[in-house]
Image (spheres, rainbow, N blue to C red):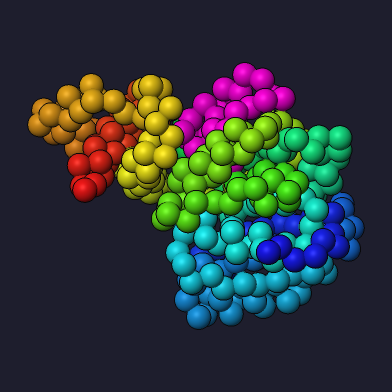
Amino acid sequence: MSTAVDRELTVIIPTLNRAEQLACCLLALKQQTLAPERFDVVIVDNGSSPSQLADVQRAAATAPFRTTVLIEPKRGPAAARNRGIEAARGARILFLGDDIVASRPLLAEHLAAAKGREDCAILGFTDWAPDLPVTPFMRYLAPDRGPQFRYATIRDPNHCGYQFFYTSNISLARHWLDLERFDEEYPYAVLEDADLGYRLEKRGLRIVFHRPALAWHDHVIRFWEFVVRMERLGESMVRFAQKYPELRADEGLIPCEAHRTRLGRRRRLHNALLTRMIAAADLAGIALPQRWYERVLEYRFVESYFSALDRRP
């Protein structure tokens, strides 16, 4: 059961061994234009080391707004966010990442955009942090059309679709989260948000894009890190496809058997060579054709998907 409501907004932030980034996240929340008595923050530690957890608790102790630090032993952001929802005191819930730095009006913008829109989630805009050394690969990833964030592909800002349930910067009325919660069987920070978005969309939720709700992603992402993410996406997609067979016809989302033919030895060797080239170029800050990135990431995703599919009993 959720706790009593006595705030307009609760910010929920899962974290794992990123106390330094979380401190920056909290510093930005201390500088909000929204008065501190109008919101609270719930931080859910998801298995940090003792020293990192101590740093998290120290950072939270200096906040001018009510801050709760919880410990969730079950790994995964889905479990962490569900724990945060249970402790939330706000009529509206805002999900942020621990490496997200809010602009000063972020919280006020979420509340303003939500007025008269109880049937809507408000999706803010997340860009790279201004002082971050953005590599060519990162420019491919986000924020316009890449696989990390792809705001430029939103066709209708008043009905973005469940794929844009980005928990880096999205808010919704708490009553929606009494209907559905995150599926804790997703172990990674991939697809667990789209899964919830899909179930809520079927219940009538619309996602509205509100660009003035601006935040910055303070995280340098290397190519190899994102390769691992794509492999985890492939593994998680097996569960997603199993839960929602009506979506299997979308070959742009869920691989079909025709994709398996692209995993032959020749393609595997070519992909391995291209992977090493991209990794070296990424470290050197050299831009490569976008199609090269796409080929490698798609291959890793499809390969991981069928590998996980074949392991299922």
Q: Identify the residue at the far left of this view.
A: 265
Q: In this view, does 129 lie to the left or right of 122?
A: left
Q: Does 88 appear above or below 186?
A: below
Q: Which residue is nearer to you in this view: 231 or 146?
A: 231
* Quarter of the view holding residue 279: top left
Q: Does 15 appear above or below 55?
A: above
Would you say residue 27 is visible in this rendering? no
Residue at point 47%, 43% (across, down): 191
Q: Does the magenta stretch include residue 149?
A: yes
Would you say residue 298 is visible in this rendering? yes
Q: Which residue is nearer to you in this view: 144 or 303?
A: 303
Residue 273 percent location from the top left of the image: 19, 35
| Tally of numbered discs | 0
Name the magenta segment's main secondary structure. Answer: loop
Residue at point 58%, 80% (across, down): 54
Residue at point 86%, 62% (across, down): 6
Residue 285 percent location from the top left of the image: 41, 39
Residue 45 percent location from the top left of the image: 56, 69
Q: Which residue is nearer to you in this view: 163 or 301?
A: 163
Q: Is residue 300 left or right of residue 237?
A: left
Q: Identify the residue at the far top of this view.
A: 155
* Quarter of the view holding residue 212: top right
* Quarter of the view holding residue 299: top left
Q: Quadrant of the N terminus?
A: bottom right
Q: Does the magenta stretch include residue 49?
A: no
Q: In this view, does 87 lie to the left or right of 117?
A: left
Q: Which region of the structure is painted magenta?
A: 141-166
Residue at point 32%, 45% (across, down): 235
Residue 186 percent location from the top left of the image: 43, 52
